[in-house]
Image (spheres, rainbow, N blue to C red):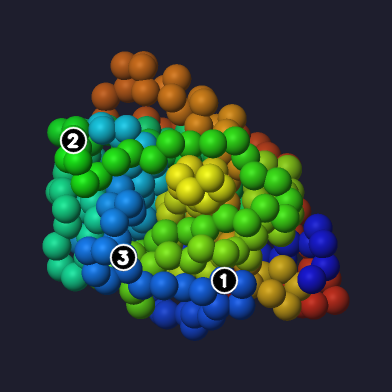
């Protein structure tokens, strides 16, 4: 892998053409039984519009965390109304442990949706959704968050995806390959629907969220996942929650020079859904 040359990004938000899965760095386990999903019920499927979905996770009884680009209809670029979204906590085999509507959708104030192939949005690709009713069930515990991980750290991901949309999958042992500005490059396996999935550190036995999946990318000959280095962006979002921002809040355009996609000897090209 050529360090520092991130070739291309692709959103993994809405169901589309399937991509092949692999377990090149850690085993992917589908959580299909009650015992397997125990402790992970706070991860759920976030349905948007008529057929789109992402992954989201409960971080407080009234709030879930996901990727900001999940709030947009990728075919029109228009934001979904909160009434068009639903959080299905612990969704497994056609049933959820809790069903909640969305009252407010709050993206990071520096995030602007400009289409599916924008590299400079990943650093701010974070959103908090306020549920219409809190989830206060003993079986669903909100996840704590933690500091940004470092290069080489082991992490795990729990996500839904196109070809595993009816039950979450857990990959326990992927790694932070590097950090490029405010973006984490991960060896984790993601696909359409994995956007917004929580990236966990599993040190000490208690999973804590350290990033959120934004996209997948091609780096040299390898397919990697991109996650937001979320410690600072999440702090900004927590401040936004307290503001009077009823409904959807669109951010102002922001010019960013986070990354430049430069063709290299490996033939950098956009991968599209």
Residue designated by label 2: 136
Q: Is residue 69 visible?
A: no
Q: Is residue 50 left or right of residue 262?
A: left
**Circle 2: element type:** loop
Q: Residue at x 82, y 68 (%)?
A: 2
Q: Percent from the top left, x then y, of residue 120?
A: 64, 47
Q: Nearer the viewer, residue 150 or 133?
A: 150
Q: Is residue 26 visible?
A: yes
Binning the other alpha carbons within 10 Å of mark 2 as few (below 14), some (14 to 19) or many (20 upward) gives few
Residue lying farthest right?
Answer: 265
Q: Percent from the top left, x then y, of residue 169?
A: 39, 67
Disc 3 or 2, which lies upstream in sequence?
3
Q: Nearer the viewer, residue 223 or 27?
A: 27
Q: Is residue 211 left or right of residue 192?
A: right
Q: Nearer the viewer, residue 46 or 98?
A: 98
Q: Nearer the viewer, residue 255 or 44?
A: 44
Alpha-carbon distance for marks 3 and 2?
21 Å
Disc 2 or 1, which lies upstream in sequence?
1
Alpha-carbon distance for marks 2 and 1?
33 Å
241 to 168, vertically: above or below? above
């Amino acid at each position: 892998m050529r360090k520092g040359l991130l070739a291309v990004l692709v959103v993994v938000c809405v169901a589309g053409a399937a991509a092949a899965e692999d377990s090149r760095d850690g085993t992917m386990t589908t959580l299909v039984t009650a015992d397997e999903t125990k402790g992970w019920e706070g991860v759920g499927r976030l349905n948007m519009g008529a057929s789109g979905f992402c992954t989201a996770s409960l971080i407080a009884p009234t709030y879930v965390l996901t990727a900001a680009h999940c709030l947009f209809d990728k075919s029109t670029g228009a934001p979904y109304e909160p009434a068009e979204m639903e959080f299905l906590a612990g969704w497994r085999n056609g049933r959820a442990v809790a069903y909640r509507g969305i009252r407010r959708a709050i993206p990071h104030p520096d995030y602007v949706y400009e289409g599916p192939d924008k590299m400079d949005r990943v650093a701010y690709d974070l959103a908090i959704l306020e549920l219409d009713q809190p989830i206060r069930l003993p079986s669903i515990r909100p996840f704590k968050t933690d500091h940004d991980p470092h290069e080489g750290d082991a992490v795990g991901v729990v996500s839904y995806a196109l070809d595993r949309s009816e039950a979450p999958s857990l990959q326990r042992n992927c790694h932070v390959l590097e950090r490029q500005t405010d973006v984490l490059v991960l060896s984790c396996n993601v696909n359409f629907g994995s956007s917004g999935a929580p990236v966990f550190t599993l040190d000490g036995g208690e999973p804590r969220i350290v990033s959120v999946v934004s996209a997948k990318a091609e780096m040299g000959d390898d397919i990697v996942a991109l996650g937001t280095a979320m410690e600072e962006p999440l702090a900004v979002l927590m401040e936004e929650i307290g503001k009077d921002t009823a409904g959807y809040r669109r951010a102002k355009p922001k010019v960013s020079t986070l990354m430049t996609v430069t063709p290299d000897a490996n033939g950098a090209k956009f991968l599209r859904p």
